[in-house]
Image (cartoon, rainbow, N blue to C red):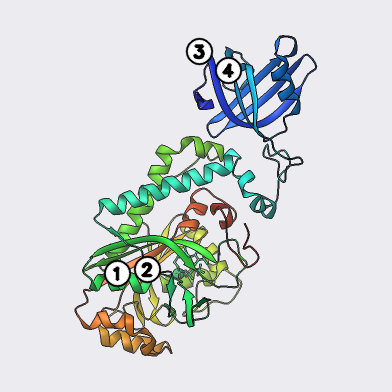
Amino acid sequence: MRIPIQSVTPESGHAEVCGWVHEVRDLGGLAFFLIRDRTGIIQVTLPKKRTSEAVLTAAKQVSRESVVRVAGMVKAIDKAPGGRELVPDVFEIISMADSPLPLDVVEKVPADLDTRLDARFLDARRPRVAAVFQIRSAAMHVINQYLHHEGFINITTPKIVAAATEGGTDLFPIAYFNKEAFLNQSPQLYKQMMMAAGFEKVYEIGPIFRAEEHNTTKHLNEATSIDIEVSYADHHEVMRILEELIVKTYEYVNTTCSDQLSSLEISDFVVPKPPFPRLPYCEAIEIAKKRIEDPIEYGDDISPAAERALGSEMGGHYFIVNWPSEIRPYYAMPYENDPSICKAFDLMHPRMELSSGAQRVHQHDLLVQQIRKKGLNPESFEFYLRPFRFGMPPHAGWGLGADRLVMTMVGLANVREAVLFPRDMHRLVP
Ligand code: ATP
Ligand code: MG
């Protein structure tokens, strides 16, 4: 019976493993193979004089990255990985790999990102790549667990929609029978409608689609968003939830993914400490003005250069709060005493924005007014506005980019590295 390579020890006796041929070395009288599975690597040693003809024939034919089944006696040996080797009496080629390989799994030749993504199935055989997705899986696990534990209801909202969340041009039109339809850019309107349905705390982890013609290291055309919405909560309350979620995620990865972190050569994984600073937007602009060359004024978006300057000033996660209403969506709640600013926030990692959120407008007439102010037509939002006329609790929420969360947590240069099969302007396959 096959056992994971990691659990083969010098005491295993006779053992059977299955995996990929990681490396082949032929030293005349001796041949060495390294066999790799998801858990580790084992040396397979063939003393040619004492090895059966069948084993030798298969071993001679096999190519790197073929899948093999190998069984034999395990012996202690100092110089081999894990301090043991296997001397095979069975060497079966299960699936032969073509040569040359599109990508060097052993990583002697570093591949560029495009080559890696084109051959993602091979790329992901490399432990440091697999580690990213194991960490992503752990992060998603603890996020689900945390939100479930906090009483959130997991919902699934449609990805095929008739109207844009915020108007705008960032939408992918699709052919939907004979109607105009789009891929949804955010679950925003639907999660808010569930506040009118009385669910009180909802969350969704799902795809968002943005037809942005960006070609940056942090934008995808298909991303994964972690979204929450909470009734009777204000922006302060949902910022607290967000900061706790980030800390819990880092803590969980830190305690359960030590092997993966060392595969990624991360020896200084730091769990952020709450509370994260709340930096008012107007102060953020003042800091950016002093630190960057490009002009930036009150009322501008935080440019990538400003993001970087603020990041190095703040040194860790922080919130930007109290944004000008003009540059936030219509659903962000203006302050009663100064409607020119609103109860919106962004959660920032020193490298980039991770999340946007706000207390929402729950008053129907104010919402209509705000939609108009943005130059949008309330009639195209009737399905969304209707619940606001039949008892809508006050509420707040946020959307957190899962891909950027993983990217910044493990220090990846490009968000595409945190996604198995990224979609961007130039990439639709595989
Ligand atoms: P940015 O200004 O960085 O383009 P955004 O403000 O347009 O982001 P939001 O609409 O606020 O993005 O979405 C909430 C979060 O979802 C973002 O903070 C980000 O983490 C993630 N996100 C949004 N768009 C993308 C994208 N195109 N690629 C990757 N992640 C995204
Ligand atoms: Mg945003």
Kind of residue at badge 3: Glu
The image shows residue 127 at horizontal and vertical percentages of: 58, 38
C-alpha separation, residue under disc 1 versus residue under disc 2? 8 Å
Distance Cα–Cα, label 4 vs label 2: 52 Å
For marks 4 and 1, the one nearer the N-term is 4
Give the residue type at disc 1.
Ala
Image quadrant, ligand 2: bottom left
Of the two numbered discs 3 and 2 in the rendering, the one whose residue sits closer to the viewer? 3
Mark 4 burial class by Cα count in 10 Å: few <14, some 14-19, many 20+: some
Q: Give the x, y percent position of residue 326.
A: 42, 83
Mark pair 3, 2: CA separation: 56 Å
Rendered residue at 49%/81% (across/down): 168
Which of the two labelled residues, at mark 1 and mark 2, occupies the earlier sequence position?
Answer: 2
> Viewer-proximal residue, 137 or 270?
137
State how far apart marks 4 and 1 are (Cα). 56 Å
Q: Is residue 70 above or below residue 373?
A: above
Farthest residue, direction left: 391
Lower position in the chain sequence, tag 3 or tag 4: 3
Q: Which residue is mark 2?
A: 357
Residue picked out by circle 3: 11
Question: Which residue, given by chain and number where applicable, does mark 1 sit on?
Answer: 396
**Measured Cα–Cα span from mark 3 to mark 1:** 58 Å
Tell me the SS state at disc 1.
strand
Q: Residue most toward the top?
A: 50
The answer to whether marks 1 and 2 mark residues whose Cβ atoms lie closer than 8 Å is yes
